[in-house]
Amino acid sequence: PGGKRDHGTPSPTKTLKRNPRYDNVQAKTDSGNNMKRVEERFGLSSFRYKRAELFARVKADKLAEQMEMYGLEDVLLLDLREKSEYDDFHIQGALNYPACMMSRSMYQFTPEILHFKNKEGKLMVLYDVGEKLSAAVGTNWYEKGIENFVVLSGGLAALARSHPHLTAGEAPTAVLAARPQTASPAKPSRAGR
């Protein structure tokens, strides 16, 4: 009232100056596994998000760099295509995990996935030929509370074109010609609200 303004309260849009005196102070609370820690652990600073997606993505070049420098000890590659497609052609070291497994009400996750699921320093990479299956499964996993996964941008096709030495089997022409087809962004389920 009376037009007076409280000058002691900072505006929510005003950025406070960082005090260099406290640059070395670290938080004492461990908030657990999060994407920032996984990103730092694997040096994958190219994680990116697409609008209306709830999960992160990684470029084929960055994944290839990770595979060549550090191997797959802490990375689980999951091929979401049918077994016959996987048997013909896949990324070296990947496991087959058909997307239809997500529709089962029990035992959706393999022992390998359970070993990696939300574990500190572990990362799961979902991929299919383009991005349609992986985007749908990524949304589903996010809604189930799985945090340490990314989707391969451009899918198997992108990696096969840029780094064919990291694939196993004979690349079908359809895979090399494929361009990313993303699924329509799924709306979060009411259960998560």
Image: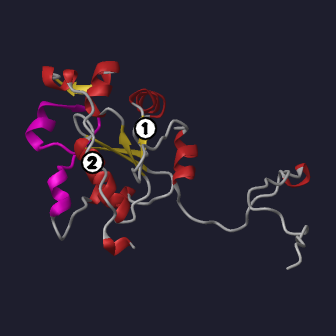
38 left or right, relative to 20: left
Q: How many other residues sit within 10 Å of disc 2, few (<14), some (14-19) or many (≥20)?
A: few
- Residue 63 is covered by the magenta coloring: no
Task: Work out whether residue 126 can be spotted.
Answer: yes
The range drawn in magenta is 80-103
- Where does label 1 land, which residue? 58
Q: Amino acid at mark 1?
A: Val
Q: Position of residue 27 (x, y in %)?
A: 73, 63
Q: Position of residue 122 (x, y in %)?
A: 45, 51
Residue extending farthest front: 2
Task: Work out whether residue 172 can be spotted.
Answer: no
Res 15 label: none
| Front in this rendered view, residue 98 or 134 | 134
- Where does label 2 land, which residue? 184
Which quadrant of the figure has residue 130? top left
Where the N terminus falls, by quadrant? bottom right
Q: Secondary structure at mark 2?
A: loop
In this view, 43 is above or below 191 = above
19 left or right, relative to 70: right
Q: Position of residue 64 (x, y in %)?
A: 41, 28
